[in-house]
Image (cartoon, helix red, strand yellow):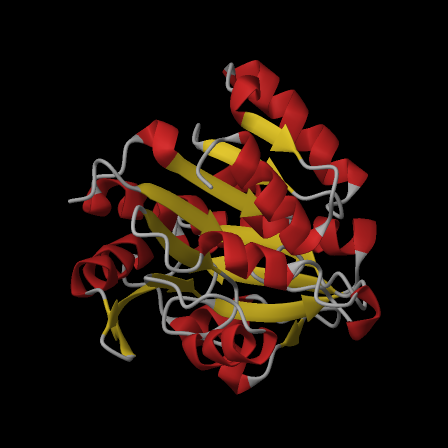
Amino acid sequence: MYPDHHLLASDLDGTLIPPSLREGNGGIEAFAQAVDGRPDLLLAYVTGRHKALALRGIGGFGLPVPHVLVCDVGTSVFHRSDAEYEPDPAYQELMAARLGGADRRELQRRLAHPRLRLQEDEKQAQYKLSYYTPGGAEGEALARWAEALLEDAVGGANVVYSQDPETGEGLLDVLPRGVAKDVAVRYLHDKLGVDEDRLVYAGDSGNDRAAMLTGFNVVVVANASSTLKESIWEEAVNLGIDSRIYFALAPYAHGVLEGCQHFGIV
């Protein structure tokens, strides 16, 4: 247990990793210098990527090596052991229970739609079924359609919609009931024993929304869409947690570092 430690849990793409080389490295060097080697800071990356792709991104952009990897939009957790990342068996059991015996092939059959396109095999996971959709309002409407369909057909699933920050293409993830990045972050909070005031979550997109509204300290980087910022603020005010939401003035890793400084964890 780490009651005297801080925990930074951050999304990767669009948050720490900029969408294109046009953005430079988005402040990764400054971020790495501030957090790397801090004995009182635990680092977790919480991403939609699968483990191999997450590790490739971490190495390719020179990000600090994390203690924990949360992959597949919160459906898999890996802890660093020497140079390897080992799956958390208790979290695997939790995902299996949340899935409730729903059959993947049946989900795919029911979600057959001309505007839903399965993502590549390497982007699928044991507890995540992922599709490409059109962006914008059409993609959001498809997500609502899928959620209603699965509620009637299999007793429900969590359908998470976001957009690729570079292409604008819609990304739709079907997850076990009640599961998104927030479940994984709450699990890490409980497992690691970090005080709530010492935990900071950073994100930029729709699949970070649930984690941003858990009541932990939150950094919304400047490059997040105005729609997401407005939605997060309104809901945070309704929940009485608006004092825990920090809207960074800087984008990407510069914004994450700015937020960490605001909350006093670096």
Q: Nearer the viewer, residue 59 or 87?
A: 59
Q: Residue at x 51, y 81 (%)?
A: 56
* Residue 236 sits in quarter: top right
Q: Tell me what residue is drawn at x 71 percent, y 34 percent.
A: 229
Picture layout, residue 90 above or below residue 221: below
The residue shown at (79%, 38%) is: 226
Residue 106, compared with residue 244, is above or below; it is: below
User: Is residue 233 shown to the viewer in this render?
Assistant: yes
* Left or right: 97 as drawn, with respect to 55: left
Residue farthest right in this picture: 22
Q: Is residue 115 left or right of residue 197?
A: right
Name which quarter of the figure residue 86 lies in.
Answer: bottom left
Residue furthest to the bottom in view is 121
Nearer the observer, 108 or 93: 93
- Location of the N terminus (image quadrant): top left
Q: Is residue 251 left or right of residue 153?
A: right
**Is 263 in front, or is 142?**
263
User: Residue visible at 55% across and 69% down?
Assistant: 130
Q: Quadrant of residue 66?
A: bottom left
Residue 245, placed above or below residue 128: above
Locate residue 185, reporting x and y percent.
37, 46
Image side of residue 25 versus residue 159, left or right: right
Nearest the viewer among 141 and 214 is 214
In x, y percent, where is residue 215? Answer: 44, 27
